[in-house]
Image (cartoon, grey):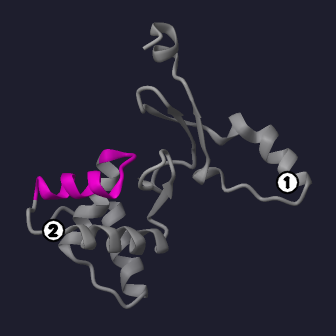
Amino acid sequence: MKTTPMNDDLATRLKEQGLRLTPQRQLILRAVEDLRHATPDEVLAHVRSQVSSVNASTVYRTLEVLEELGLVRHAHLSDRAPTYHSTVEHEHVHAVCRRCGTVRSYDPAVVQPVVDALAADGFVVDVGHLAIFGECAECGATGT
């Protein structure tokens, strides 16, 4: 399996926790990176396209481990399963179109006034977990 900086980071963090670097963990991390925003089922389908022997429980457990290690994060971009994304990307706010399901990422600066107002009241916002729902320009323009 090809070594990448993220795989090196994965190996180091796993070793620090007394865990092994397995091919499945590498494949699952790579799937999250490739898919950018993916549910566990989407990660599973992506991994199974390469290795059919990986099961759903392995994906779910591995995503939990990867999140504990700080290599992936999740956000709730629908009313279904959480969506995972790599922490290699900069922290971002998610904008989700309710009509077509498109997810766009925005710099946290776009919500800074809200973050500041909440901070003034003693509330600390987890911007990377923030999802804003609405309608994208394409759906709004076409009325679909």
Residue placed most toward the observer, 12 or 78: 78
Mark 2 vs mark 1: give the one in front.
2
Residue visible at 29% across and 47% down? Answer: 34
Q: Is residue 37 magenta?
A: yes
Tag on residue 127?
Answer: none
Residue 110, horizontal then vertical, whole percent: 69, 34
Q: Spatial distance from mark 2 to mark 1, Cα to Cα?
A: 43 Å
- The magenta region covers 35-50
Instruction: Check the picture and name the quadrant holding the C terminus.
Output: top left
Q: Earlier in the sequence, mark 2 or mark 1?
A: 2
* Position above or below: 109 against 140: below
Q: Judge left or right: residue 29 versus residue 75.
A: left
The type of residue carrying mark 2 is Val
- Number of other residues with Cα within 10 Å of mark 1, as a class: few under 14, some 14 to 19, many 20 or more: few
Q: Is residue 49 magenta?
A: yes
Q: How many marks?
A: 2
Residue 130, horizontal then vertical, whole percent: 61, 48
Question: Which residue in the rendered view is the most extreme toward the top?
Answer: 142
Residue 19, horizontal then vertical, whole percent: 33, 86
Residue visible at 46% across and 68% down? Answer: 67
Instruction: Check the picture and name the quadrant holding the N terminus.
Output: bottom left
- Residue wearing tag 2: 54
Tag on residue 119?
Answer: 1
The type of residue carrying mark 1 is Ala
